[in-house]
């Protein structure tokens, strides 16, 4: 990763922030994008590296995504890795959910990935670089009370899988990275049925994979140019395995598991 230009969206916290530190430790040149510019500036100061560009951007806005790419080319002249990490979550039964909540999740999670990838693609093809989509196990297994979240993550996986096949002969590397439950702010910022912030995680974050461990594994997968990375054994690899061979059993286990969350809308 030495001197590779790496763009990370959603870099102000959680996995995105951990990715910034991980790739910096590998000698990469960083472009950090997020809505909270003050947090990006803090990361830049902590890393004490002049080769870090921070860009305030909302990835649900196509022009903001273009701005990220334009600023990167203006400053560094190339793009080697684009990590589409920005994302939001939600928790509510679909029967209670306002439809605009799903639209907001699709705008940030799916369309943010599409916009950034579309703008970066010509430059990535020149470097035979990497496109990364940070999805979730929810992109392989439908999670109850998270219909919008699962829909957006399935959509990202389908988009990136198709993009990979389109570019088999162009040298483009496409990685779909699916963390299991990872300690981050994503559940605190999750949307409720009316679009308001959940404000408090319903899970014990201390028992989850750390964002730093997740970032390390994603960086290794980028280096090895893997096509897929499914993290954690039980909530990740084993869950995907069950879904292929015993989908009915997985449905029941998933329901029972998610029902145990404090204040779960599932009964």
Image (tube, rainbow, N blue to C red):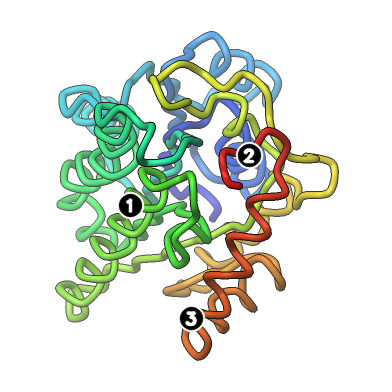
Which residue of the protein is positioned furthest toward the bottom in this rendering?
Answer: 245
Q: Circles 3 and 1: CB distance less than 8 Å?
A: no
- The mark that comes first in sequence, 3 or 1, is 1
- The mark that comes first in sequence, 1 or 2, is 1
Which residue corresponds to the image point at 23% horizontal and 61% vertical from the top-left?
Answer: 159
Q: Nearer the viewer, residue 253 or 182?
A: 253
Q: Which of 209 and 207 is in front in this view?
A: 207
Q: What element carries label 3?
A: helix
Question: Residue 107: x, y in percent?
Answer: 25, 34
* Mark number displayed over residue 247: 3
Above or below, 33 relative to 155: above
Above or below, 264 relative to 166: above
Which residue corresponds to the image point at 19% horizontal and 30% vertical from the top-left?
Answer: 66
Which residue corresponds to the image point at 69% horizontal and 66% vertical from the top-left?
Answer: 232
In this figure, what is the number of numbered marks? Answer: 3
Instruction: Choose top left, top right, bottom left or bottom right for residue 116.
Output: top left
Question: Residue 3: x, y in percent?
Answer: 49, 47
Name the quadrant of the N terminus.
bottom right
State the residue position of label 1. Answer: 151
State how far apart marks 1 and 2 are (Cα): 20 Å
Q: Is mark 1 on a helix, strand or loop?
A: helix
Q: Which of 75 and 163 is in front in this view?
A: 163
State the residue position of label 2. Answer: 264
- The mark that comes first in sequence, 3 or 2, is 3
Above or below, 21 relative to 43: below
């Amino acid at each position: 990763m030495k001197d590779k230009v790496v763009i990370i969206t959603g870099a102000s916290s959680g996995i995105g922030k951990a990715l910034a530190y991980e790739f910096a430790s590998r000698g990469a040149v960083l472009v950090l994008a997020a809505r909270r510019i003050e947090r990006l500036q803090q990361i830049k100061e902590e890393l004490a590296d002049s080769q870090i560009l921070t860009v305030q951007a909302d990835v649900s806005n196509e022009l903001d995504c273009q701005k990220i790419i334009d600023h990167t080319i203006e400053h560094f002249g190339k793009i080697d890795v684009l990590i589409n990490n920005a994302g939001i979550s939600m928790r509510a039964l679909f029967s209670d959910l306002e439809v605009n909540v799903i639209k907001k999740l699709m705008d940030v999670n799916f369309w943010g990935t599409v916009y950034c990838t579309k703008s970066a693609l010509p430059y990535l093809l020149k470097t035979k670089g990497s496109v990364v989509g940070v999805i979730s196990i929810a992109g392989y297994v439908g999670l109850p009370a998270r219909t919008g979240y699962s829909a957006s993550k399935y959509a990202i996986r389908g988009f990136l899988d198709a993009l990979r096949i389109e570019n088999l002969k162009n040298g483009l590397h496409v990685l779909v990275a699916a963390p299991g439950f990872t300690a981050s702010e994503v559940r605190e910022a999750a949307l409720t049925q009316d679009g308001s912030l959940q404000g408090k995680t319903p899970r014990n974050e201390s028992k989850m994979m750390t964002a730093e461990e997740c970032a390390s594994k994603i960086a290794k997968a980028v280096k090895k140019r893997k096509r897929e990375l499914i993290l954690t054994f039980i909530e990740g690899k084993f869950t995907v395995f069950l879904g292929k061979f015993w989908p009915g059993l997985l449905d029941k286990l998933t329901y029972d598991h998610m029902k145990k969350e404090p204040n779960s809308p599932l009964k």
